[in-house]
Image: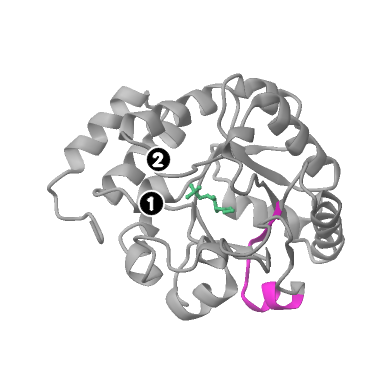
Amino acid sequence: MDWGMKNRLSQLIKSDGKCLFLPIDHGYFLGPTSKLEKPGETIKPLLPYSDALFVTRGVLRSCVPADSNVPVILRVSGGTSVVGKDLANEGLTTSIKDAIRLNASAVGISVFVGSDYEHQTLMNLSRLVDEAEEYGIPVMAVTAVGKELEKRDARYLSLCCRIAAELGAKVVKTYWCENFDKIVNSCPVPVVIAGGPKTDTELEVLEFVYDGMQKGAIGVNLGRNIWQNQNPVGMIKAIRAIIHENASAKEANKIYESEKGKGSGGKG
Ligand code: 5RP
């Protein structure tokens, strides 16, 4: 691997081999998602605890301070909306030239395996890898399920992750599920856990993050369960403790509880 590629990966994946990516890219198909109406305000208290920000070029340019030293994973696929016909019908939205101009440490793209747009989105990934490799930029593949959240099982997700890795993704993001080790053990590149819609309790999130880490994930790319929480700083600190300090879910929950009422809850 060339020095540039290694250097960019080491900006994202910390020296312990773990990472906490904070995604705020949801607006690219969901519009003004709850608690992300003003992304700049949402992320302000969370940036110090984020190893990277997953973001579109529009929000990066308009809402993220240019003197931020948090590495950027640029979301470069899209072209659909939640009110449109099919979320899977994505194309590449951003050139590699713009990713370089924006000093991105990586680029991220969704693939929709099993959908009507499987071939198109997998070819998007292949083309992106071809272009990004030329400049030493890692590609993170997002194994997306669109509105079909019930697709999240180990058999389907291990298929998606393996295909994404075979096509050249350097990191794969997928949902947590039972038997998560089946996914990690059959994927030749690092796997990060996606969050999904906000859960009823904090402990649910902390438990699946803990389980996923025990089963070989290198970290998370987890948004709504952090910034839609009433205590987002408590939540990101708790998740960080599981990832970087080997905390159990219960220990992390104590960190979450101890942060309540400290007034650092961002938009609350
Ligand atoms: C959307 C994405 C998001 O980055 C991803 O869903 C992670 O965010 P959340 O934890 O809120 O699900 O890739 O396709």
Q: In the figure, 159 relative to 262: above or below? A: above
Magenta stretch, residue numbers: 97-110
For the C terminus, the image quarter is: bottom left
Report how many numbered discs are placed on residues in the image.
2
Residue 10 in the image: state x and y as whole percent.
62, 50
Mark 1 in CB contact with mark 2 (< 8 angstroms): yes
| Residue 129 location, quadrant | bottom right
Name the residue located 35 percent from the left edge and 45 percent from the top edge: 236
Q: CA distance from mark 1 to mark 2?
A: 7 Å
Magenta stretch: residue 105 in it? yes
- Along the viewing direction, whichever of 111 and 15 lies nearer the viewer: 111
Task: Name the N-terminal-most of marks 1 and 2.
Answer: 1
User: SS class of the residue under badge 1?
Assistant: helix
Mark 2 neighbour class, 10 Å CA radius: few under 14, some 14 to 19, many 20 or more: many
Name the residue located 62 percent from the left edge and 75 percent from the top edge: 102
Residue 189 in the image: state x and y as whole percent.
73, 37
Q: Which residue type does callout 2 highlight?
A: Arg
Residue 167 visible in the snapshot: yes
Left or right side of 178 for 110:
right
Residue 242 in the image: state x and y as whole percent.
41, 32
Q: Which mark is residue 240?
A: 2
The residue at which mark 1 appears reads as 49
- Asked if ligand 1 lies within 8 A of label 2, the reply is no
Name the residue located 73 percent from the left edge and 62 percent from the top edge: 90
- Along the viewing direction, whichever of 124 and 73 lies nearer the viewer: 124
Q: Which residue type does callout 1 highlight?
A: Tyr
Q: In the figure, 46 relative to 79: above or below? A: above
Colour mapping used in the image = one colour
